[in-house]
Image (cartoon, rainbow, N blue to C red):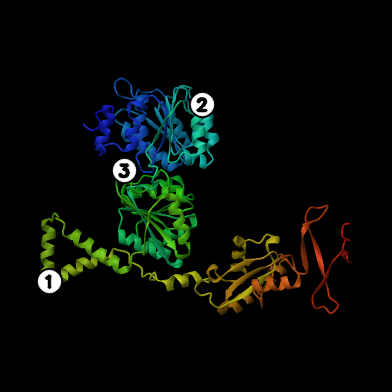
């Protein structure tokens, strides 16, 4: 029996779950040398760390009968950085210790705190939670840790990165002196080692990450270069080409998640979204839809990069480039888990290739550079998948057989087969035609500076700039309201120190100018202070050059800002440029109307 060295009830749970052996980290924490000791464990994402510390806790949770004693209060505490990871840990420990009779209380932000307190009062032996909510229960007296035997810090590096050091220290300081401390972390930076030194006693250090390769051995990395405007089309083609059981698409911002989620829904994909703007209830529904196979695609920010363990994730797509090598690995680690193979794809706009190559070198990841799947490649894959599906043995009842015979009589075999293929294809989103990855296309993408429809534009000037607090967040809606245009009809916005320039397509410039004048007059008549908007004969660059020729270095018109601080006030003192007698340009700078006098050289 492969688990004969484990407690019988845990061995039975592993076998029922389909385990035929332990991963490296799971084996390392149950060896005789690890019994009773504090553990400092570094293991790569997806290596089975949750089950690993679940097995390690057995000696602290199980009595002589191999069961968890009832109504004892918390014996083990697991702290995780995010709600999603805490809920995942709770589920994993739930099936592992179900036969042993463990009662698990989960305490995370966004859930019903009163229900959590009832679970704690009910004698939960295992408590899983996030730092903020656990500290809240501790301070309110709902969480009693005096009988705790073991504490686990899962993804400890992430908790410190998120600023939870104070919460962790308060929680650990409330635990008994003799408890075990198991610290699990994907990386072991200096601050993790310092935390371990304070709260652990002669910890056994375990690492299952190879020194020569930080990449995940079960993940095939691919990098695909695309024209910048075709990133979303490349995502569509990737999803259609792979037809993954579950795919996760990572974006950098909530806005991008929202936009891509809408795009994919419109194309016919079964897709859900996960980001910081969703409530806990919405996240739970999204995760359940993925587990039930009602959805097959998840668009997410990095909030989902740690701790979410979805069954059958075979494809991870980095729609927007990760911020660094660590983020790349944590995102990619959602696939290739528990011995299964996975694919991680980076979609790289042409101008960003060098940055991605540098990131991959830093992460010691070998990625295969390739072009995104074309529409023809996808159609070929569709044909192969359909043939494979239809040629599989199937049970046909008498009613289906009778209907098939009637169709053959009326249409013939070839037409029936064609209708079957057509019905299958009708359910699939259509692939996109992408620009060929040629030197000409890359050069055109590199040189492209304007959005489509903004090749011929007119500059408009607003009499407000950075010194008056100008910001695109409110300038854009102001332009839409004043000029009666949509945000898609506004081009570049260039904010200067005292003025702002805006691009408007020439074909709507007259309409925009007329509306801006009318709304401006209406605001002034109502007694409101209105921002001036007028057509400009020059753009921001020409105006800047004119200012430099006149002696202006960026202040309001007619002023020149000295780089030296004023002696008393500490700020920059404005100097007026005195014109020449013929008015043709700046003469000597004056201060309070008096010309500067050169100081005599020092003797």
Which quarter of the rendering shows the N terminus? top left
Residue 219 is situated, as x and y percent measured from the top left of the image, at: 34, 50
Q: Quadrant of residue 490?
A: bottom right
Left or right, residue 413 beside residue 462: left
Name the residue beneath numbered marker 3. 338
- Residue 57 sits above or below residue 159 on the image: above
Q: Quadrant of the C terminus?
A: bottom right
Q: Is residue 423 visible?
A: yes
- The disc, 3 or 2, on the residue closer to the chain's N-terminal end is 2
Q: Which residue is mark 2?
A: 174
Answer whether labels 2 and 1 touch (C-beta < 8 Å): no
**172 relative to 205 in the view: left or right:** right
Relative height, residue 571 to residue 127 (above, below)? below
In terms of depth relative to the viewer, which is nearer, 504 or 578?
Answer: 578
In the rendered image, which residue does mark 1 sit on? 412
Q: Secondary structure at mark 2?
A: loop
Residue drawn 31% across the image and 20% down it: 64
Distance Cα–Cα, label 3 vs label 2: 35 Å
Q: Nearer the viewer, residue 499 or 594?
A: 594
Residue 323 as seen in the image, left or right of residue 4: right
Percent x, y of residue 498: 70, 65
Task: Look at discs 3 and 1 and give the one toward the viewer.
Answer: 3
Secondary structure of the residue carrying numbered label 1: loop
Of 78 and 213, which appears nearest the observer?
A: 213
2 vs 1, front mark: 2
Residues at discs 3 and 2 in contact (Cβ within 8 Å): no
Spatial separation of the CA atoms under disc 2 and disc 1: 78 Å
* Residue 294 drawn at (x, y percent): 32, 52
Please rate how many residues cluster around mark 3, counting C-alpha atoms within 10 Å: few if below 14, some from 14 to 19, many from 20. Answer: some
Secondary element at image label 3: loop
- Check whether the beta carbons of the residues at disc 3 and disc 1 lie within 8 A of each other: no
């Amino acid at each position: 029996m492969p688990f004969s060295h484990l407690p019988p009830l845990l061995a039975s749970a592993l076998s029922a779950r389909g385990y035929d052996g332990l991963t490296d980290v799971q084996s390392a924490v149950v060896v005789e040398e690890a019994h009773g000791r504090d553990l400092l464990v570094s293991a790569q994402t997806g290596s089975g760390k949750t089950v690993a510390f679940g097995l390690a806790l057995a000696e602290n949770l199980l009595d002589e009968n191999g069961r968890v004693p009832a109504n004892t209060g918390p014996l083990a505490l697991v702290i995780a950085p995010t709600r999603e990871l805490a809920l995942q840990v709770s589920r994993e420990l739930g099936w592992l210790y179900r036969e042993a009779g463990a009662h698990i209380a989960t305490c995370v932000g966004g859930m019903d705190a009163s229900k959590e307190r009832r679970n704690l009062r009910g004698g939960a032996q295992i408590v899983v939670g996030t730092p903020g909510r656990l500290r809240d229960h501790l301070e309110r007296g709902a969480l009693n840790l005096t009988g705790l035997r073991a504490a686990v810090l899962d993804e400890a590096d992430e908790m410190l990165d998120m600023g939870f050091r104070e919460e962790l220290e308060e929680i650990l300081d409330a635990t008994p002196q003799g408890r075990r401390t198991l610290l699990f972390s994907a990386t072991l930076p200096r601050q993790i080692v310092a935390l371990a030194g304070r709260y652990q006693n002669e910890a056994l250090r375990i690492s299952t990450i190879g020194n020569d390769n930080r990449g995940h051995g079960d993940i095939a990395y691919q990098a695909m270069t695309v024209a910048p405007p075709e990133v979303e089309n490349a995502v569509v083609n990737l999803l259609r080409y792979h037809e993954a059981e579950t795919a996760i698409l990572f974006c950098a911002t909530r806005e991008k998640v929202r936009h891509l989620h809408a795009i994919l829904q419109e194309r016919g994909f079964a897709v859900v979204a996960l980001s910081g703007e969703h409530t806990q209830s919405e996240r739970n529904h999204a995760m359940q839809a993925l587990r039930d196979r009602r959805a097959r695609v998840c668009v997410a920010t990095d909030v989902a990069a740690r701790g979410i363990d979805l069954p059958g994730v075979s494809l991870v797509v980095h729609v927007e480039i990760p911020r660094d090598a660590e983020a790349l690995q944590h995102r990619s680690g959602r696939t290739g888990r528990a011995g299964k193979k996975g694919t991680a794809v980076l979609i790289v706009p042409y101008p960003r290739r060098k940055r991605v190559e540098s990131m991959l070198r830093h992460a010691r990841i070998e990625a295969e550079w390739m072009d995104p799947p074309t529409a023809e490649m996808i159609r070929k894959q569709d044909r192969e998948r359909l043939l494979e599906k239809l040629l599989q043995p199937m049970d046909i009842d008498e009613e289906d057989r009778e209907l098939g015979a009637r169709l053959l009589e009326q249409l013939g075999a070839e037409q029936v087969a064609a209708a079957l293929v057509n019905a299958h294809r009708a359910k699939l989103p259509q692939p996109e035609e992408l620009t060929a990855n040629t030197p000409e296309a890359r050069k055109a993408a590199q040189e492209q500076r304007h959005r489509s429809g903004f090749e011929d534009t007119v500059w408009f000037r607003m009499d407000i700039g950075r010194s008056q607090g100008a910001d695109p967040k409110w300038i854009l809606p102001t332009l839409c309201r004043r000029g009666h245009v949509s945000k898609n009809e506004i081009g570049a916005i260039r904010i200067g120190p005292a003025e702002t320039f805006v691009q408007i397509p020439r074909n709507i410039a007259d309409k925009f100018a007329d509306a801006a004048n009318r709304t401006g007059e209406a605001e002034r008549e109502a007694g409101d202070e209105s921002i001036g908007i007028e057509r400009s004969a020059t753009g921001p660059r020409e105006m800047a050059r004119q200012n430099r020729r006149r002696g202006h270095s960026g202040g309001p018109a007619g002023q020149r800002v000295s780089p030296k601080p004023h002696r008393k006030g500490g700020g920059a003192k404005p100097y007026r440029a005195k014109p020449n007698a013929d008015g043709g340009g700046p003469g000597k700078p004056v201060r309070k109307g008096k010309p500067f006098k050169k100081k005599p050289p020092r003797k």
